[in-house]
Amino acid sequence: MVREWDPRTASSAEMASLLATLNAVLAADLPDDPPWRETSLREYLSEVMPGERRISWVAQAEAAVDGPPGAILGHVQVLLLGDIGVLEVLVHPDARRTGLGRTLVQLAARRTYQEGFQSVGVEVVGGTPAMAFFEALGFGRDYVETRSVLRLATVDWTAVGAMATGIGTGYRIEFCPGGPPDDLIESYARAKADSRDVGDVGDGELRPSSYDPQRLRDSLDCLHRRGMKPYIVFAIHERTGEVAGLTEVVVPAQHPTRADQYDTIVVPEHRGYGIDRAIKARMLLELRAAEPELTEVQTWNALANEAMLAVNAELGYRPDRQWCEYGADVAELVHRLDARTR
Ligand SMILES: CC(C)(COP(=O)(O)OP(=O)(O)OC[C@H]1O[C@@H](n2cnc3c(N)ncnc32)[C@H](O)[C@@H]1OP(=O)(O)O)[C@@H](O)C(=O)NCCC(=O)NCCS
């Protein structure tokens, strides 16, 4: 049975069943990724930024008469933002190749179309069945990034300590767990607006629509509500007090042993002073102290971003997988999927 599903009101048995399916998917497709925990999973699946909506469906196994509810075997959600619907879909490895994935995407695509959106996008992990799946559904590949993972056990902490202090004169570094102080938020927003093309391009909420101060505050609030704790290291240009560079890392309650690197930015006029290396090194030192459970950090970079890839390699990051953005015109997608099931 496939039905619309609201994580805010779902029973705890459903949440546990979805978590078990998610972890079975990870074990099958990304066996080196840490399993997820139930902590804040409900909030992770339901909280959104102002103006955005998330709509979900589940595929549930039939329950035996008088038995417990059937397991959740599949889940799809679409996040409606701007003019695009961003899809996430998963099917339990034991239930694959029966058409469930296609049915779930069809439901989400139809709703996206009905809501007046033009296109759908999805992030697909290289080397997993999802690539063949989305290609079979007629999606095209728009963009490819590399995910790299740093294992903290392999870090040369003496070298990282030296990197953290290797910044040009006239700059100081500030560590802001939880988010920036109010007096930095405008400069933080300006730095993000000025520097769209650089650094790590993290997942999610702190990019790319987060350029004005209120939007950034909303983004940080949304992260907190979803159980994702942001840490920011700033390089401040001392003469002007302006943000010259920043790096953001988020530790999700759902997998607190592996943190996600979000944006790293050096404002154009402050490049060439070792800021990127110093702020990322300082972040690692701070995270080691603040998050004792943490064992890994993952980051995503455009293949062309050689400067940030070099800094990441120096810190000990190792390329892991390709991360591909696929997209489709939603009207054409609905037409194709409906034609198949007619
Ligand atoms: C991608 C995923 C959702 C597909 O679910 P599914 O229920 O197996 O997909 P379907 O049975 O509807 O497959 C539809 C078509 O996709 C293609 N396809 C799906 N899996 C495939 C695979 N392993 N190899 C080749 N083609 C595949 C086939 O053309 C298939 O049609 P067919 O079975 O008639 O040949 C599932 O593998 C999954 O959960 N992956 C992990 C989560 C994920 O990566 N999601 C995407 C990012 S959000």
Image (tube, rainbow, N blue to C red):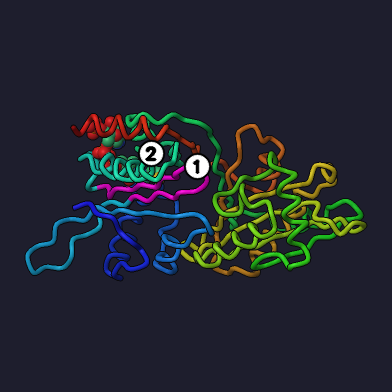
* Residue that protrudes farthest toward the left in the picture: 65
Q: Quadrant of residue 221?
A: bottom right
Label 1 C-beta lies within 8 Å of the nearest ligand 1 atom:
no
Q: Nearer the viewer, residue 315 or 93?
A: 93
Q: Residues within 10 Å of mark 1 (few under 14, many from 20)?
A: few
Residue at the location (50% across, 42% down)? 83
Quadrant of the picture in which ligand 1 is shown? top left
Per the image, is 87 magenta? yes
Residue 47, position as x, y percentages in the image: 47, 62
Residue 236, position as x, y percentages in the image: 83, 58
Residue at the location (64% across, 32% down)? 304
Locate the C terminus and report the quarter of the image it occupies. top left
Q: Which residue is mark 2?
A: 128
Which segment is the magenta one? 76-93
Instruction: Count all numbered tags in the image, as a single digit.
Output: 2
Q: Quadrant of residue 53?
A: bottom left
Considering only order in the chain, which callout, 1 or 2, is on the residue closer to the N terminus? 1
Label 2 C-beta lies within 8 Å of the nearest ligand 1 atom:
yes
Residue at the location (84% across, 52% down)? 167
Residue type (three-letter) at the residue carrying disc 1:
Asp
Residue 333, position as x, y percentages in the image: 35, 33
Residue at the location (38% across, 44% down)? 112
Q: Which residue is mark 1?
A: 83
Residue 247 drawn above or below residue 145: below
Per the image, is 186 magenta? no
Report the side of 268 relative to 89 (left or right).
right
Q: Nearer the viewer, residue 116 or 320?
A: 116
